[in-house]
Amino acid sequence: MLAATAVIIDISGRSDLGLNKRLLITDVDNTLFDWQEIWYRTFSAMVEQILSISGVDEERLYAECSAIHQKYGTSEYSQLIGELPCLQEIYGEAVYNYMTPAVDAFRAARNDALKLYPRVLETLQVLNALGVVVAAFTESKAFYTNYRFRKLGLDGPISYIYSPDDHLIEPNVTSMRKYDRDHYELKSAIHHFTPDGETKPNPHILNTIIKDLGFQNDEAVYLGDSLVKDVYMAQQAGVTDVYAAYGAGQRRPEYELLRKVTHWTPEMVKRERAALESDLIMPTHVLSAGFHEILQFFGMS
């Protein structure tokens, strides 16, 4: 792995870092908003209602959530309730009739928790005014990515999104979605789907995105909150890496619940923990105060 001296970016300092930078590729979750907080609050609110209504065993519920999340490659499977075996055994096809309070609790928690980090939107607007192309690269599926971009006003200030396509809904599962697919589509940003099965840290995907957008690697800056998935990937791709330390949540207490039900395999969790506990991945640049510090890479002091 690459190792480099970490540099803390001071927003009041030099502006010469950005003389040839014209493209910002940013991670989304825990970089533009606190995904971990959103996930924790929505999932916890939903699970609390499920347990209260059904009385199912809590550990069995978590184990089944993990199995379904791994099946679909996401910890945000939107039809999770309808596919839980422990609930199907009790309610059959009428799961959602009984679990409406759980769905309502999920949505109420989401509405309360869904907000950008401070100064994200205004910083994106400054970048747009400077003529910087802004693209997002996320591993979150299309459904929730599109929802958040529309609700948070990111559909426009961010011109391109690269993410996995939405998961398929099993034909025998009742959907909790209220509207047609068109309702969930973006209105301005152009959405490209990353190849099936290809995940971060894959430098080939990052290089492909840069080429697809018509830039050279030395014109791009990549920003993300994960040392393993973001910093290491950018370094391997030969792209200026910037670590969003303000958004790193891997050591927060609620991360333990995510590990319980994550779509990651035990091997993936173990590998990430080992990387975090080592000094093998050193970011070249670090943002500690917030997203707005990224402006220094584009000629703004």
Image (cartoon, rainbow, N blue to C red):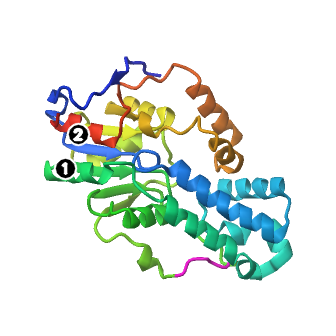
Where is 1 relative to 293, above or below? above
Residue 34, percent across and down?
48, 49
Q: Is residue 129 left or right of residue 264?
A: left
Circle 1: element type: helix
Q: Is residue 197 visible?
A: no
**Residue 294's image quarter?**
top left
Q: Earlier in the sequence, mark 1 or mark 2?
A: 1
Q: Amino acid at mark 1?
A: Val
Q: Amino acid at mark 2?
A: Leu
Residue located beneath label 2 in the image: 295
Circle 2: element type: helix
Residue 74, percent across and down?
59, 55
Name the residue: 19% across, 38% down. 298
Q: Which mark is residue 126?
A: 1
Asked whether 20 falls inside the magenta stretch, the response is no
Name the residue: 22% across, 34% down. 296
**Residue 270's image quarter?**
top right
Name the residue: 33% across, 63% down. 153
Asked whether 175 falls inside the magenta stretch, the response is yes
Q: Which mark is residue 300?
A: none
Specify the principal SS of the magenta part.
loop
Whether the residues at callouts 1 and 2 have beta carbons within 8 Å, the answer is: yes
Please give the range of residues in magenta: 173-178
Q: Is residue 266 visible?
A: yes
Residue 102, percent across and down?
68, 70
